[in-house]
Amino acid sequence: MSLPTAERFERHRRTLVYHAYRMLGQYGDAEDVVQDAYLRFSDAVARTAIDDDRPFLRTTVTHLCLDRLRSARAQREIYVGPWLPEPVVTDERADPLASATLADDISFALLLALERLAPLERAAFLLHDVLDVPFSEIAPTLGRSEAAVRQLASRAREHVRDRKRRPHGDRAQRFRVREALLHALETDDPEALARILTDDVVFTSDGGGKVAAATVPVSGRANVSALLRGIARKGLRSVARREFVTLNGWPGMVTLDESGTVHDAIALEIADGRVAALYAIRNPEKLRTVTAQFANR
């Protein structure tokens, strides 16, 4: 007896959503794409027999993402300030190993590197290097020869391979670093703050031109320390509510006002027990999913 269509689809939903998220950098859009893929899958199942659901769904999601990427490129070119992916809250307590894997597979560093790629390069790289799909299967998905797809993936790999991969360290250490950073800011202790930051630390803030945010990434211990202390003096003590979370596999936090609306989602990338990068998402359009997650807490 064959499984119901919905049950067949649900077996692949999580993988499909993360594939779409890596393609688009927008979690809400990724969920929309996967829902659209389900409708197409249901229609196809009703009309014909599908021998293997996985390649059909993977191809459908990839095509839908490519369509969105092509239409979104013009909008990205006029984006105000640095662009960051929409943050994803992951549950490290439920599955620490899976969370560590996600810290590589959906890290801000990887997603920002993918932004430099053309849509077909991105698709070829993610299908082959992340999902382990053979080039012989990717070729018909992208409508290119196998040799051309190999070249696409190779070019993408050149761009992506230089992204910094941070050693994760153990979970307790990562969260101790977050607590130490907050304590240094709350007590306005510049020496303690300097000890927590790497020499080449980078702070990137995405306001999308809708809220106040740094218009360029800020780098270097002295510059980032001064920026963080300034932000803390202006707003840290006035935060109505703070939630400690794991964002894209790394320790982070979200700040909320009294109405429960998320103002910021900040992820900390940690290397050797110190903060190497901070990613602050402030664009309200990118905080809707996170706000919905905390609305009833």
Image (spheres, rainbow, N blue to C red):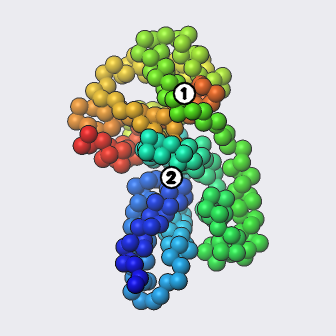
Compared across the picture, whether 10 is left or right of 293 comes to right
Q: Residue drawn 41% across and 67% down?
A: 10
Residue 91 in the image: state x and y as whole percent.
43, 44
Instruction: Name which of mark 2 and mark 1 comes first in the sequence.
Output: 2
Query: Amino acid under label 1?
Result: Gln
What numbered label is drawn on residue 25? 2
As drawn, 245 above or below 47: above
Compared across the picture, whether 158 is left or right of 58 comes to right
**Residue located beneath label 1 in the image:** 173
* Mark 2–mark 1 CB contact (< 8 Å): no
Badge 2 element: loop
Of 212 and 249, nearer the camera is: 249
Residue 292 in the image: state x and y as whole percent.
30, 47
Residue 226 in the image: state x and y as whole percent.
52, 17
Q: Picture quarter containing residue 44?
A: bottom left
Q: CA distance from mark 2 to mark 1?
A: 28 Å
As drawn, 136 above or below 248: below
Of 140 and 92, nearer the camera is: 92
As drawn, 108 above or below 64: above
Query: Amino acid under label 2?
Result: Gly
Q: Residue drawn 61% across and 62% down?
A: 131
Residue 297 in the image: state x and y as whole percent.
26, 39
Q: Residue drawn 64% across and 67% down?
A: 133
Residue 13 in sight from this viewpoint:
yes
